[in-house]
Image (cartoon, rainbow, N blue to C red):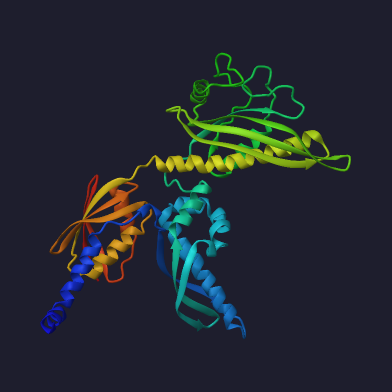
Amino acid sequence: MLPIMLWFEKHKIKLAVIIILFGLCLPLTAPAKALRTTTVNVIGTGRVCDKNISKSREQAIADSLVSALESVLSEIISRDLLIHNFQKLNEIFYRHTDRYITDYKVFAEVSSGNRYRVMVQATISVDKVEKRLVEEGILLGKTPLPEILFLVTEQNINDPIPKYWWGRGMLFFESTVEKAMAATMADKGFHVIDHGVRMPSLDGDYPMNLSDIEAVNMGILLNADIVVIGNAVADKAINRMGSNIRSFKGMINARILRTDTGAEIAATQKAAAAVDSNETQGAEKALSHAGQLAAKELSAQIIAALQDKKEAEMLEILVQGTDDLSNFVMFRKTLETIPGVKNVQTKLMRPGETTIVVLFQGSARELADALMLKTFVMFGISIDKVSENYLKLELIPG
């Protein structure tokens, strides 16, 4: 028994290295379900409050958490999008840091003059940030948002039949539900085609109930990327208050078709209620609210469809300078935090170099650019080669 214990004692360091290397070679389990987070170190500043250091500290921490979120957002979306959406980002993220920051630690703090500074390490949920950016119509990188043509019929409470702008004799018809949907989607960055009255470029008669082919053809004629086809109806609801106040309901069914393929990429069915003493105004309120709800859901579905269009690619990375195992482990962990990285596996390990395979939603060039923005504490990286599905880089000791 004693000789075996002596052997384990003598070789315990080698065994530890073998166990670590074996763990690196194991594939990740269910990577799609793993919550993606990233950790950043930031400094926050607060104004020194007389006899209230606690308040100064809180201000400095709050400032640091905003900086942490700003750092993550700058890696996910471009500088132009940050500037263009600054007000919206402020309302969504910077005022609600607790929704996206899962944890933080204060490493150091100091009071200097009239300023109180803290050094904070914050952990941010990348998945939550990206999900909200998609919902708000911001996360599309450099891809322009599509141009939309609305083809929605509308039947208000006093209309005997539905109305639609492409119908003859309806030159002055302005759809309540389309107006609400267009405003909502334009606010999210979509370009809505102003068809005005019946467009001269539309040849022939188009029926009220358009087929998918007819809707797509109209979209092509008016240079639309996608068309919204559907119908909206307003009606009285049962609820009432007194003799004058009535409730009304608006309902909409809508689908989104791509004009280049004719494929359906989004669909929704929404209903909303409104209260008013005037029938026409009450019905219009209900239709407008239903249109807003439908537009928000359709916007998220469209953007998600455009994001999914960019399929994940299998990239190979040759990492040299892996003699220092701790540097390689840190590099791999950092690689896994990059937005778009779905899975990382070790393919081959040799003395001084390791080949890994990455499932990435983007090109090798985009992955290389993302890596160049990362900061490593004990080492740096030198990217020597970038091809279609291949990266070659070296870990350089700091």
Residue at the limit of the structure toward the front, as seen here: 1
Front one among 28 and 339: 28
Residue that lies at the very extreme toward the top in this rendered image: 204
Residue, far bottom: 51
Q: Nearer the viewer, residue 83 or 327?
A: 327
Q: What's the residue at 53%, 83% (across, down)?
A: 113
Residue 232 visible in the current orientation? yes
Question: Could you tell me which residue is drawn at 42 percent across and 28 percent down?
Answer: 261
Compared across the picture, whether 191 is left or right of 169 comes to left
The answer to whether 117 appears left or right of 372 in the picture is: right
Does residue 353 appear to the left or right of 398 in the view shown? left
User: At 37% from the left edge and 42% from the top edge, which residue is drawn?
Assistant: 310
Q: 397 or 106, which is in the foreground?
A: 106
Residue that sits furthest to the right in the current view = 243
| Residue at the spot 19% in from the left edge and 65% down from the top edge | 322
- Give x and y (percent) for residue 45: 51, 74
Residue 143 appears in view: no
Task: Pick the quarter of the image with the N terminus.
Answer: bottom left
Residue 162 vertical position relative to residue 285 in the rendered view, above or below: above
In the rendered view, would you say 95 is above or below 386? Answer: below
Q: Position of residue 183 (x, y in %)?
A: 62, 40
**Residue closest to the eye, 286 or 271:** 271
Instruction: State the image quarter where residue 209 is shown.
Output: top right
Residue 308 location, quadrant:
top left
What percent of the width, then of the height, locates residue 335? 31, 59
Q: Where in the figure is residue 320, as x and y percent of width and height?
A: 18, 61
Q: Quadrant of the C terminus?
A: bottom left
| Number of callouts | 0
Q: Is 75 left, or right, of 4 in this rendering?
A: right
